[in-house]
Amino acid sequence: MSGLRRALALVAIEAIVVGLVALAIVLSSDHVDARGANAAIGLFLGWSFVGTGLYAWWRRPDNRFGVLMTAVGFAFFLGSLTAADASWLFTIGVLLSNLYLAVFAHMLLAYPDGRIDSPRVRKVLAAGYGLAIVGPLPTLMLADLQDEGCTNCPDSAISLGDHGVLYTILDVLTSAVAVVIVGYILYMLVQRWQAASQPQRRAMAPVTWSGICLLVVLVGQLTTMAVNGPDALENATSLLGLIFFALTPYGFLFGLLRSRVVQASAVSELLRRMGDASDGTTLRELLSKALGDRSLQVVYWLEEARKWVDASGRPASLPAEDDPARAWTAVERDGRRVGAIVHDRTLCEDEELIRSVAAAAGLSIENERLQAQLRARVEELRRSRARIVEAGTAERRRLERNLHDGAQQRLVALSLTLRLAQGRLRKDPDGAENLLGGAQDELGRALEELRELARGIHPAVLSDRGLKAALEALAGRSPVPVELERTPPERLPAPVEAAAYFVVAEALTNVVKYANASQARISVTRSNGHAVVEVADDGVGGADPGRGSGLRGLADRISALDGTMVLTSPEGAGTLLRAEIPV
Amino acid sequence: MAHRILIVDDHPSFRASARVVLESEGFDVVGEAVDGASALHECCRLRPEVVLLDVQLPDIDGFNVCERITAYAEHPTVIMTSSRDGSDFGPLITTSGACGFVPKAELSGERVQELLGP
């Protein structure tokens, strides 16, 4: 037997003993009417709370709700002391006779998670406990108990004599304070009900509503007493209050039973409908119905990309550990994580239900995960394709601009200069000669710019002489010393050579622009069916992969060939750009 | 009397060549501007009779500059120029208020005079 079980068994034995003592006190009382009925009802109510409380305690040891419900039962037994014939026992009994109501309110306010976090609620509860103890003092100290309808009652052990007027004033005052406190607790319960989500309400309903009804009756009862209403009404409200009080533990058990039945039928319904593919209902809708949570979401785990996505393949995020409203439950299949159900946090209370549903949905989620994975790939391809098209357009814009601003302007100036020279040829041959000299220089610069531009579009040496020659030329033109370490001896497919060339060209441009390096090295090797291109420098590092469109465009170009590109650039330790392209 | 002309272009090599060409054919080049904003400013300051205006300027589009210049009551005559062909611009040249277009490579005092009329 575990420690918890032993402790609970001990509490149960105590409850039996306390109940039997209470029974004996009531049965032997000389001032209680209908002793048999009173004793039986008292025993039934006390044991109902203790029994149900112990069950809840055993089921959820971390949740203090079970402890509180057990405490209500014991506090209720304390009230039996009012039946005692000994004066001091009777006095203690009256003093503690309302304590069970304060514990009951505590239990209601702590339901269903067993905690009270709000300081405001704690203050109200403290006032409730205080009033429960202090409330009977005026009766015990200032009233004549025989006059108050308690014929044959023993005398109060703390009586100060009969002070009718003072007693009436204090009694009305305590009743009024009690009405305010109970009314405020009612208000908080109703407010909490209104703020609750659908699954929360389902969990709260039986206990909260029987509690609310009891408190409403209690407010009525206190008001009747304060205004000294007719006895018949007082008796009727007492009976009604007793019924609602008695209903509370059974409401709790009913809630549990219902969630068991709901759980079993939800899982079997889920399995049946998931098998019926023609239905047209989505998995999300099925799970949402099975768990009674309309806000439910299903997300899928992509192992390769190590990220969560929704059904359309877009990145999704999970609620944080401490999110007060939302939680998630992982769905696994054959020990592999395939997805997660994101749901209302209240469902965590019903762990078995959510686990059964998650297990039942495993296969379907695995199937949908594959679809989501496909959609995520399609989405990434679509984006990459759009970027390639955009990069193409941007490249054409850049070429047009370079042609227009560079060679074209030089040729325009050249044309004007030649016309001027032509005009001066006869009148001013020396001037014409100067102009022609200038034109010669301008033409040289235009040619150089055109060459540079043509190389940027596609280097002829690459097509004609291969990667080694093209990279040597690139290294030779770089202002930073570049060592070409290795190149494959054979030719690679043209798209691979072009991609490798532009990786090196872009990397060297970045080395010159940003790295502040003293040297760089290039290597192109073949390994495991891939061309591996590496450009490393000894510069300042700290390069940002998102910087500029150059690297992004290159990454797209390489991913279009099913390759990958990785930039490693720790602060102060140089930069390494590595691309792997399948050959 | 020689026409007072303002040259607006962001390429210094063209501005220099155009100045030599126009001055050698009797035009009085009163100033140069490198972008749209300074073109508008120089127009007010120098009050030229003719503005030789490049279509593609770094800040404001040349046609837009032309519309602003020709919106004044006593505005100079604007002649658009570009290293592109005039047909690239469709009806923009006439709708912008310019009096005509000269391709940069064909710029001469004679072509400008033809557009200005007798």
Image (cartoon, coloured by chain):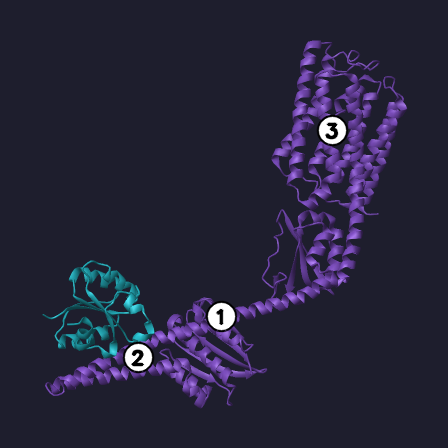
The residue at the point 84 percent across, 20 percent down is: A84
Q: Which chain is cyan?
A: B
Q: Nearer the viewer, mark 3 or mark 1?
A: 1
| Drawn side of residue A466 relative to residue A399, left or right | right
Question: Which is nearer the eye, B41 or A450?
Answer: B41
Per the image, label 1 sits on a secondary structure element best described as helix
Residue A243 visible, this orientation: yes
Label 3 neighbourhood size at 10 Å, few (<14), some (14-19), many (20+)?
Answer: many
Residue under pointer 1: A387
Badge 2 is on which residue?
A407
Q: Which residue is mark 3?
A: A101
**In the drawing, does residue A184 fall left or right of residue A488?**
right
In screen coordinates, is A565 left or right of A455? right
The label on residue B86 is: none
Residue A21 visible, this orientation? no
Number of residues whose C-alpha sits closer than 10 Å to that of mark 1, classed few (under 14), some (14–19) or many (20 or more): some
* Quarter assignment of residue A189: top right
Q: Amino acid at mark 1?
A: Arg
Whether residues under marks 3 and 1 lie with C-beta atoms below 8 angstroms apart, the answer is no
**Which type of secondary structure does the marked residue at label 2 adopt?**
helix
The residue marked by circle 2 belongs to what chain? Answer: A
Residue A217 on image: x %, y %: 74, 27
Image vertical order of residue A313 relative to residue A242, above or below: below
Q: CA distance from mark 3 to mark 1?
A: 69 Å
Name the kind of residue labelled 3 in the image: Leu
Tell me where residue B74 appears, x and y as whole percent. 18, 60
**Residue A110 lies in what quarter of the image?**
top right
Going by the numbered disc 2, the residue's amino acid type is Ala
